[in-house]
Image (tube, grey):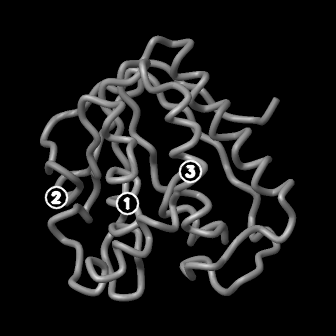
Amino acid sequence: VPECIVAENVWLVRHEGCRGPGEWREPRDIGVVVGFVPKHAPALSGGGTSEIHCTYTDLADRARYRAQVDAAIQACCLLDCDGIVVGCAEGLCGSEVFGHPLLEVARVWREALASRAAQFRRVAFALGAPHASNLRVAVAKALVETGLCARHSTLALDGSASLCHASSEDQNHLQHHTCSLE
């Protein structure tokens, strides 16, 4: 069983002046937090983590990451969560931080969530801040457009980057990424 941390009834408190999503002024109650740390810098082939043809050299690394994702989703299901926010470390942003191929990470989340489609009414991905060299927004949008949203009443892309912040370069790459996620 993959290691993960489960914490129930968590309060999110930000310091005064914090510019997080929604600029909350009061503490927020979060029902459950499930976290895991992906393997750092698995061997890759096909270029850098954001390259279209980048994949895991050893398929066991993908299987290990998928097992972590499945364990986190299973914990949310067992705790009867009706929504899930895929955070930075565990999700699309984490592909850059931990050196996993971005498109493979997106595929893993799509596969894992598709098998639990009836559980969640809302799925959101934290994307982090946009910058010219990343394709997280386009890849996240491709997740939505390749069928994940058809199984969920709401699928959002939360964080400081949202679909409306996608650059024209990201939009131009979107069609190719949509096909690549298949």
According to the picture, the residue beneath numbered tag 2 turns out to be: 17
Which structural element holds mark 2?
A: loop
Q: Residues within 10 Å of mark 3 (few under 14, many from 20)?
A: many
Closer to the chain start, of discs 1 and 3, is 3
Amino acid type shown at disc 2: Gly
Spatial separation of the CA atoms under disc 2 and disc 1: 34 Å
Q: Residues within 10 Å of mark 1 (few under 14, many from 20)?
A: many
According to the picture, the residue beneath numbered tag 1 turns out to be: 142
Q: Picture quarter containing residue 166?
A: bottom left
Which labelled disc corresponds to residue 90? 3
Q: Nearer the viewer, mark 2 or mark 1?
A: 1
Q: Residues within 10 Å of mark 2 (few under 14, many from 20)?
A: few
Q: Please name the residue shown 78% across and 35% down the image.
A: 2
Report the side of 156 relative to 96 (left or right).
left
Residue 21, relative to residue 128: is it above or below? Answer: above
Which labelled disc corresponds to residue 89? none
Q: Nearer the viewer, mark 1 or mark 3?
A: 1
Spatial separation of the CA atoms under disc 2 and disc 3: 27 Å
